Amino acid sequence: MKKVLLSLLLLAPMAAIGQPLSDTYPTSAGDVEITLVGHGTLMIRFDGQVIHIDPYSQVADYAAQPDADLVLITHEHPDHYDAKALEQVVTPASLVIANTSVGSIYERTNRILANGESTEWNGVKIEAVPAYNIIHERTPGQAYHPKGVGNGYLLTFGDFRLYVAGDTEPIPEMEALKGVDVAFLPKNLPFTMSDEEFVEAARTVAPRVLYPYHYNSVDKKALQEALPGIVIR
């Protein structure tokens, strides 16, 4: 038990408790600062570079945000693929990586990653992980997020592994995710997960630190009680 607590403390964010949306993690490749901008949107600073994931203009003024060195887009829904936000942070020098559906409509896409494919950028390994619904459907037979379309992303910074799940339910592919240090999992019905599904996915991925994101409401105290041994941010 002491070893588990020690490992959690060593991995705990360096940011102050009063700033829960922006945390910095030490890694063997250098510090990784992760900011939950809002909804399903993240910004990461690493090695002097800026990574935007699903920039969304309804949660931030992207005209005031730093230009992107790298953009990752999970899928084509407008709260993840937002042309207005992208116009404000994507420059000719930016690398844009997207899933197949966004890659087919966004002409600035540089690399398309299908589920299971990977690439490397600035020493960071980027793996496209499936993100889809099994139960929740828009209409009978039509999932909100069909299998094989959307991506989550697993990013490896040296010895540090970050999993950004995208819009998904608990899926069998999560069982193959090993050694995840920090995970962002969605929690909103009917599009992604219920509280119970969220806990199931968290237990499967078993990150050391877990951020609920893309939620309508969240009871972090209840989640912490359901997930002892995982730090809930």
Image (tube, rainbow, N blue to C red):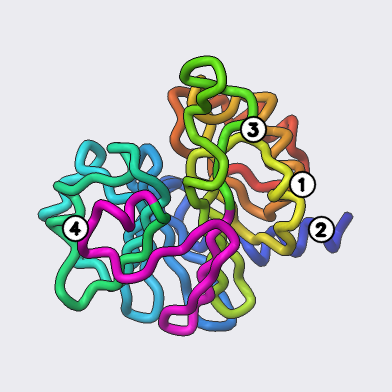
Q: Is residue 18 magenta?
A: no
Disc 2 to disc 3, C-alpha distance: 22 Å
Observer-side mark, 4 or 2, equals 4
Indicate the secondary structure of the residue bearing disc 1. loop
Observer-side mark, 3 or 1, equals 3
Q: Do the residues labelled 2 and 3 touch (CB within 8 Å)?
A: no
- Where is mark 1, residue-wise? 229
- Where is mark 4, residue-wise? 65
**Where the N terminus falls, by quadrant?**
bottom right
Q: Does the magenta stretch include residue 125?
A: yes
Query: Image point 47% across, 23% down: which residue?
Result: 217
Q: Is residue 188 visible?
A: no
- Where is mark 2, residue-wise? 4
- Where is mark 3, residue-wise? 198
In the shown orientation, is residue 111 left or right of residue 164? left
Disc 4 to disc 1, C-alpha distance: 35 Å
Mark 2 or mark 3: whose residue is earlier in sequence: 2
